[in-house]
Image (cartoon, rainbow, N blue to C red):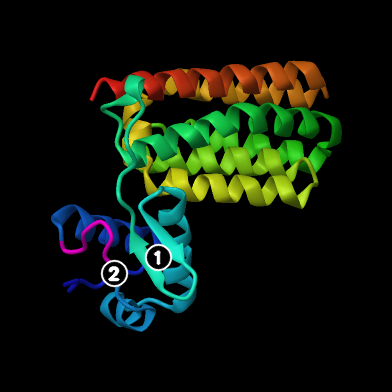
Amino acid sequence: MIETHVSRGTRIYEKVVEKLKESISRGDILPGDPLPSERQLMDDFGVSRSSLREAFRVMELLGLIESVPGKGRFVRHPKSPAEDEKNIRLEDSAVLELMEARRILDPAIAAESAMRATSSDLTRMLRVLTATEKRLGAPNLRAQADFDFHLALAEATHNFVFVNITRMNFDLIMATHDKIYNLLEDKDAFLLEHRSIYEAILVHNVELAREAAANHIDRIYKTLHRGIAAQ
């Protein structure tokens, strides 16, 4: 039984995700079991329906729960792991699949930003980079700085689809930021790669921006894959 209350914060749904993950890990809710009703979870956690549904959306992206029309939401059974990834859990696989998708999306977003970025877009990116220098220590601060930069990139495309995709991607990243940013220990590379992307966009060099973003996400994907496989 879930008997906890969620502390208030700017990202209420992240707290809900963590509490539900803890309940699944403890065996309070088993694979195949239905989640409690929305009303019960809202009362248990003291959160709104919108925050609860945002948490559900993130957990579906993580592959932890599934929604069955007309029946409700259920804890998923782990899939049979692939031969070369036999030690990777369901949540880890979701993170790697997200990074695989970003290997396609991020270079496209950077290239589009190089074509369309205005002076105010560039000012916003530089402001984020300057703030990032002071936020490289704790994983949660680095996660927020990463989100701020990539959101600024997406907004510079002036395409709402890219903005929404970036927000959705980082919903998953922020829900697992402790694992991701503890594995990504090279803080200097993190900042230098963001600067390389910015500098390419600053001179509106489309191909250079695309290449800088591709190099950035390729390094992240390979580092995470090695780190997760070694666990």
Q: Is residue 68 above or below residue 126?
A: below
Marks 1,2: beta carbons within 8 A: yes
Give the mark nearest the N terminus, 1 or 2. Answer: 2
> Is residue 136 left or right of 26 when viewed as pictured?
right
Q: Which residues are magenta?
A: 28-35
Please say whether residue 135 is visible from this viewpoint. Answer: no
Q: Secondary structure at mark 2?
A: loop
Res 94 → quadrant? top left
x and y, in percent, of residue 97 in the image: 49, 34
**Which residue is label 1 attached to?**
12
Name the amino acid type tagged 1.
Ile
The residue positioned 39% from the left and 67% from the top of the image is: 73
The residue positioned 61% from the left and 38% from the top of the image is: 150
**Number of residues whose C-alpha sits closer than 10 Å to that of mark 1, classed few (under 14), some (14–19) or many (20 or more):** some
x and y, in percent, of residue 45 in the image: 29, 74
x and y, in percent, of residue 89 in the image: 29, 37
Which quadrant would the C terminus be assigned to in this image? top left
Which mark identifies residue 6?
A: 2
Q: Is 220 one of the magenta-colored residues?
A: no
Cα–Cα span, label 1 and label 2: 8 Å
Which quadrant would the N terminus be assigned to in this image? bottom left
The residue positioned 55% from the left and 24% from the top of the image is: 217
Name the amino acid type tagged 2.
Val
x and y, in percent, of residue 43 in the image: 30, 82
The residue positioned 49% from the left and 51% from the top of the image is: 171
